[in-house]
Image (cartoon, rainbow, N blue to C red):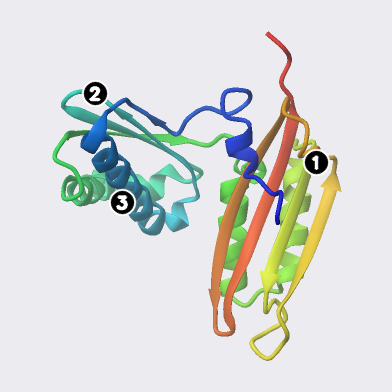
């Protein structure tokens, strides 16, 4: 039986915080949970090229506040705010609450695990060598100030006629079992002619000092 656990879930309350901030009971909890999931899936799909790092959702009695952190906010906003208007109209079909949409720019995207994972996935889809893609991503992350990075890809990484395998690249230190270690973790998926290729990224950003 596997002993793996999501590094983000393991560190919630220590180095990581919740991505949804609200409280509900009974059926309202289930409805809000499904609503959050639909909103996240839509935004990740619609804003894939914008480099989404995280989507934070906060709820009040009548409103829902959505904070989207991206590496390229201009792609999200669009010309004269047309992009934001379209996103707001799509989300309004998924929720009955008033929508407060905010866009924040990621200052260091090369060291953000979700952005790195999605960038590697899109490079593989454009038929760039998977080995080259993860090596370049690791180099950029280290140059951007990361203490360590680990990338793992699995699938038919050598083409549709190859056997499925996995490849791992590690640079620096990645102490996954240390709870005080600030480790950013994300998964990505590349959709190729030979099937899907999974990508996992761990980025170590240093230890969090005891308060």
Question: Tag 3: Cα neighbours inside 10 Å, few (<14), some, or many (≥20)?
Answer: some
Q: Residue at image x 16%, y 35%?
A: 97
Q: Is residue 108 visible?
A: no
Q: Earlier in the sequence, mark 2 or mark 3?
A: 3
Q: Of the numbered discs in the image, which one, if any, rests on residue 38?
A: 3
Q: Is residue 198 visible?
A: yes
In the shown orientation, is residue 62 left or right of residue 206? Answer: left
Q: Secondary structure beneath disc 2?
A: loop
Asked if the residues shown at circle 2 and circle 1 are in contact, with their CB atoms under 8 angstroms apart, the answer is no
Query: Would you identify the image quadrant in which residue 7 lies?
Result: top right
Asked if the residues shown at circle 3 and circle 1 are in contact, with their CB atoms under 8 angstroms apart, the answer is no
Q: Secondary structure beneath disc 1?
A: loop
Q: Is residue 38 above or below residue 32?
A: below
Q: Position of residue 68 (x, y in %)?
A: 40, 39
Q: Residue furthest bottom?
A: 161
Q: Residue at image x 79%, y 36%?
A: 147
Q: Earlier in the sequence, mark 2 or mark 1?
A: 2
In the shown orientation, is residue 115 left or right of residue 167? Answer: left
Q: Of the numbered discs in the image, which one, if any, rests on residue 174?
A: 1
For disc 2, the marked residue is 60
Quarter occupied by the C terminus: top right
Which sits in the foreground, 133 or 1? 1
Q: Residue at image x 68%, y 91%?
A: 161
Q: Earlier in the sequence, mark 3 or mark 1?
A: 3
Question: Tag 1: Cα neighbours inside 10 Å, few (<14), some, or many (≥20)?
Answer: many
């Amino acid at each position: 039986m596997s002993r793996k656990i999501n590094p983000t879930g393991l560190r919630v309350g220590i180095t990581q915080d919740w991505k949804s901030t609200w409280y509900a009971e009974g059926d309202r909890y289930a409805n809000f949970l499904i609503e959050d999931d639909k909103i996240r899936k839509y935004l990740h799909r619609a804003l894939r090229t914008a480099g989404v790092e995280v989507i934070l959702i906060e709820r009040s009695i009548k409103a829902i506040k959505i904070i989207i952190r991206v590496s390229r906010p201009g792609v999200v906003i669009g010309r004269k705010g047309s992009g934001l208007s379209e996103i707001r109209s799509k989300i309004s079909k998924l929720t009955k609450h008033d929508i407060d949409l905010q866009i924040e720019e990621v200052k260091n995207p090369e060291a953000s695990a979700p952005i790195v994972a999605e960038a590697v996935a899109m490079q593989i889809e454009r038929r760039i060598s998977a080995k080259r893609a993860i090596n370049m991503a690791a180099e950029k992350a280290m140059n951007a100030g990361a203490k360590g990075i680990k990338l793992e890809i699995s699938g038919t990484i050598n083409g549709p006629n190859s056997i499925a395998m996995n490849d791992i690249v590690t640079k620096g230190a990645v102490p996954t079992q240390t709870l005080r270690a600030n480790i950013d973790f994300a998964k990505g998926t590349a959709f190729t002619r030979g099937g899907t290729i999974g990508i996992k990224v761990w980025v170590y950003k240093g230890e969090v000092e005891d308060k």
